[in-house]
Amino acid sequence: MATVKLPTQPAAELTFAGGVRPKIANVDFDLGVTYFAYPSERLPGETNGINYWEAAIRGDRRITEDIHIAAGYAYSPDVSNTGAWSQYAAAGIGCDVPGRLLPQHLAVSFTAAAGYSWFGNQAAQLGGFPLPAYLNWQAGVTFTHKAFNLDLRYYDTNLSKENCFVFTGDPNARSGGHVNPVTNPDGLVSNWCGATFVAKAWFAFN
């Protein structure tokens, strides 16, 4: 469960996921389905809400004792209930700091990844045009001490502020951007999609 700030004003985002994690030929796979629910939307709009689901496959392989690579693909037939399908492909690399260089019970890993999202056409009542495709990338470090984990990570994207508005429908968007007569005739811009730094902490019990 996560708090969110979205145009439809839901109370929260609820994520339900399930899948399997088989190992085939030294590759750890993760195959799953995720459903995103947004309860108590006060402004459901033309799509009558933005609940949707996606399926994903991911593979992770260790190529040396300290280095591993990963790649994945995700698909949704109707992203955010807009009528547009979505596809996402990504790849990344991780490097674990050798344990002999660290204090006892502490593990540190550095990871970086990049991905690309592209979409089909939205429903006619939303304009009938495809949502803007974009690149995203991230890099960070994860510290693990027994069951406790701390991840510090930087995220960024090449999505323009104009296309950020097209993609999110930010109700606080402002004018002054480049006009696109089809997707953004008012030239509205949003800051919702800019670079950001995220710190995340969690406990994992095996």
Image (cartoon, helix red, strand yellow):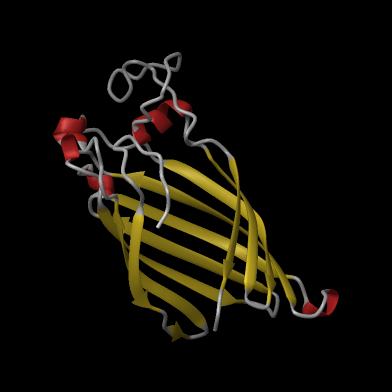
Determine the residue positioned at 80% across, 80% down.
104
Q: Quadrant of the C terminus?
A: bottom right
Relative to 37, 97 lies left or right: right
Q: Identify which residue is drawn at 36% across, 45% down.
A: 118
Question: Residue 16 is drawn in which quadrant?
Answer: bottom left
Q: Position of residue 44 (x, y in %)?
A: 21, 38
Q: Position of residue 46 (x, y in %)?
A: 17, 35
Q: Position of residue 188 (x, y in %)?
A: 39, 20
> Which quadrant of the rendered structure holds the N terminus?
bottom left
Depth order, front residue of 196/171: 171
Identify the residue at image location x=27%, y=50%. Answer: 39
Q: Is residue 120 left or right of residue 12?
A: left
The residue closer to the viewer here, 93 or 43, is: 43
Residue 110 pos. (x, y %): 68, 62
- 108, 11: nearer the viewer: 11
Side (left or right) of 188 relative to 206? left
- Above or below — where is 95 with respect to 13? below
Up/down of 28 relative to 180, above or below: below
Q: Quadrant of residue 95?
A: bottom right
